[in-house]
């Protein structure tokens, strides 16, 4: 029993850095999706701007 | 790994050999090897392996691994260890490790180890030597497994060296894998541990480690990303983050120390005296043409550079890491074959590891490796400050050289001698030119000597007596 307690008391010196890397990876992964969202928003905004531009040209030609 | 004569041969199991063959066939591996970043490695044919089996040690290992393959590595002339490097050398080894880890990714390979013990120095150039560290990566793997090892082996030692002045030998001799985040966090004051870079490099990982339940093994399970693009993006971001961290702990090029500016005024010699010293050493190198030179007490390497420019491979040792940083930067910039090492001859690096045999001591590596040893303006320091008897100093010089020694005698009347003797001159009353030359003759023939003008110092060219 004391041997098991000794094992439970052992703190793996590498676990903290491993968990930290996992958190970093999650953060960078979220940036990936954020970047995707930003790209989509930019594309949507550009498309709207182009459509407004076309309607404006049509109105002035009419 | 077996050393057979001058050859360095590694025996592999077949599955390891298959992976290595795949990697060595990639364009990145070829590029790494041709650039001198990765040790040249070639597979041995079955005929050659069969011939080598006649050697008992080789045959025995081959039997254990049977069926086995074998590769031959190009030997590095003088193996060194991280605890002997200057901070700039550890930084260069870290940069190389990241370059290789990232450089192999486009071809589907990665590094599974990131320890400084995988790097040796060929002159001033770091060379990655553990080719088996390269493995195929899962395209969905968004993590770099040796991330922690890289932080402990490179970033944290450089951090504590830069911020707290902890010498690298103190870091690595006591902790082979480098300091733990908890230990670094405890070095900080109450405010500093909450500030970058200590917050993210030491305090947070230490706190996370303490909170982690030891029976929770889920952190060791790989979690694949949803798609390869996400994995590549995450991994790329992680490597950019590591590079920013590394830049933050880079050693300062302009650092100074007690001895770093010693040669700024030619070591305090008069111009005439220094010119005579330089000419004597130059002539000795030209006459004897040594291929391998050990410069003991090299400081910023004035004479190491002279030996390298004369065509020798040089190992330059000194106890001042700042002076050696300067030498390394100069050797690296000028492509001079010099390996500067932080080694104090009075207290050279011991054998380290299991049975003191995993990493050989400096003296074990040095014996028989040089055909010239320079002992310029250093013997009096060993005599006075380290209290090593003259006979022992010269006996060690005889072990280290296979050919010549260029040694400088600095007598008790010399101002530097008197300064370091601190009133204990009477202990060296018997030391004079005659007793010095007599001591040299035990193991050496005195080829010639020269008194430096305007100084009581004398230079000697000694040739080791052959048995």
Image: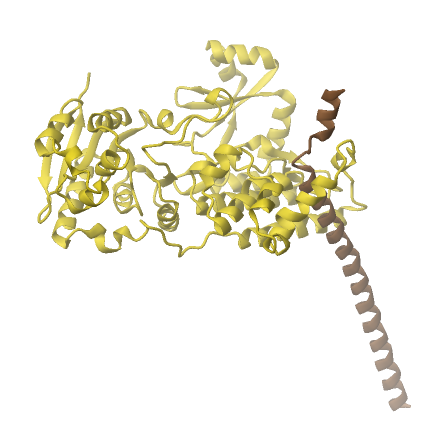
Look at the picture and state if B363 lies above or below B330: above
Look at the picture and state if B41 lies above or below B56: below
Q: Residue A48: which quarter of the image?
A: bottom right
| Colour that chain A carries in the picture | brown
> Residue B310 location in percent, x, y?
25, 41
Foreground of the two, A56 or B381: B381
Q: Going 50% across and 38% down the picture, which residue do you hit?
A: B171
Residue B359 showing in the rendered view: yes
Q: Going 40% across and 57% down the picture, which residue do you hit?
A: B254
Where does the C terminus of chain B fall, quadrant-wise? Answer: top left
> Residue B79 location in percent, x, y?
42, 31
The chain that appears yellow in the image is B
Q: Going 57% across and 43% down the picture, which residue do you hit?
A: B100
> Residue B372 location in percent, x, y?
24, 32
Residue B239 showing in the rendered view: no
Instruction: Determine whether, in the image, residue B451 is placed left or right of residue B126.
Output: left
Instruction: Determine whether, in the image, residue B296 is placed left or right of residue B202.
Output: left
Q: How is the image coloured?
A: by chain
The image shows a total of numbered marks equal to 0
> Residue B67 location in percent, x, y?
61, 14
Q: Residue A38: which quarter of the image?
A: bottom right
Q: Going 54% across and 54% down the picture, which residue do you hit?
A: B247
Foreground of the two, B147 or B433: B433
Q: Residue A37: which quarter of the image?
A: bottom right
Foreground of the two, B399 or B346: B346
Foreground of the two, B164 or B274: B164
């Amino acid at each position: 029993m004391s041997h098991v307690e000794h094992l439970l008391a052992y703190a793996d010196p590498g676990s903290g850095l491993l968990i930290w890397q996992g958190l970093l990876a999650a953060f960078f992964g979220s940036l990936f999706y954020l970047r995707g969202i930003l790209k989509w928003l930019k594309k949507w905004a550009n498309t709207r701007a182009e459509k407004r531009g076309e309607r404006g040209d049509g109105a002035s030609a009419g | 790994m077996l050393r057979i004569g001058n050859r360095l041969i590694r025996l592999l199991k077949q599955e390891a050999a298959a992976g290595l063959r795949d990697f060595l066939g990639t364009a990145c591996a070829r590029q790494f090897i041709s650039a001198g970043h990765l040790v040249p490695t070639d597979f041995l044919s079955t005929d050659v392996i069969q011939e080598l089996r006649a050697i008992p040690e080789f045959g025995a290992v081959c039997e254990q691994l049977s069926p086995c393959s074998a590769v031959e590595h190009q030997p590095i002339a003088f193996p060194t260890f991280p605890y002997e490097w200057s901070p700039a050398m550890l930084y260069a080894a870290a940069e190389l490790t990241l370059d290789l880890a990232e450089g192999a990714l486009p071809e589907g390979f990665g590094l599974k180890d990131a320890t400084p013990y995988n790097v040796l120095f060929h002159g001033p150039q770091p060379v990655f030597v553990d080719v088996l560290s390269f493995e195929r990566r899962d395209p969905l793997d968004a993590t770099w497994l040796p991330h922690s090892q890289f932080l402990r082996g490179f970033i944290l030692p450089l951090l504590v060296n830069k911020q707290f002045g902890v010498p690298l030998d103190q870091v690595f001799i006591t902790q082979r894998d480098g300091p733990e985040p908890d230990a670094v966090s405890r070095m900080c004051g109450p405010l500093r541990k909450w500030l970058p870079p200590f917050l993210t490099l030491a305090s947070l990982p230490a706190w996370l480690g303490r909170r982690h339940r030891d029976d929770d093994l889920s952190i060791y399970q790989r979690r694949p990303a949803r798609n390869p693009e996400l994995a590549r993006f995450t991994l790329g971001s992680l490597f950019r983050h590591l590079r920013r961290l590394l830049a933050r702990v880079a050693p300062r090029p302009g650092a100074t120390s007690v001895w770093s500016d010693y040669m700024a005024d030619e070591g305090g010699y008069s111009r005439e005296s220094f010119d005579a010293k330089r000419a004597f050493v130059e002539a000795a190198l030209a006459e004897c043409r040594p291929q391998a030179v050990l410069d003991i007490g090299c400081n910023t390497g004035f004479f190491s550079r002279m030996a390298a420019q004369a065509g020798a491979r040089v190992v330059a040792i000194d106890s001042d890491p700042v002076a050696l940083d300067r030498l390394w930067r100069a050797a690296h910039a000028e492509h001079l074959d010099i390996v500067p090492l932080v080694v104090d001859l009075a207290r050279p690096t011991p054998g380290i590891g299991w049975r003191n045999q995993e990493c050989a001591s400096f003296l074990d590596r040095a014996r028989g490796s040089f055909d010239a040893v320079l002992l310029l303006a250093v013997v009096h320091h060993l005599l006075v400050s380290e209290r090593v008897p003259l006979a022992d100093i010269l006996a060690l010089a005889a072990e280290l050289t296979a050919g010549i020694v260029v040694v400088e005698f600095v007598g008790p009347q010399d101002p530097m001698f008197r300064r370091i003797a601190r009133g204990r001159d009477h202990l060296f009353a018997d030391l004079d030119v005659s007793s010095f030359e007599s001591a040299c003759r035990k193991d050496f023939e005195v080829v010639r000597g020269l008194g430096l003008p305007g100084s009581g110092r004398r230079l000697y060219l000694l040739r080791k007596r052959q048995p």
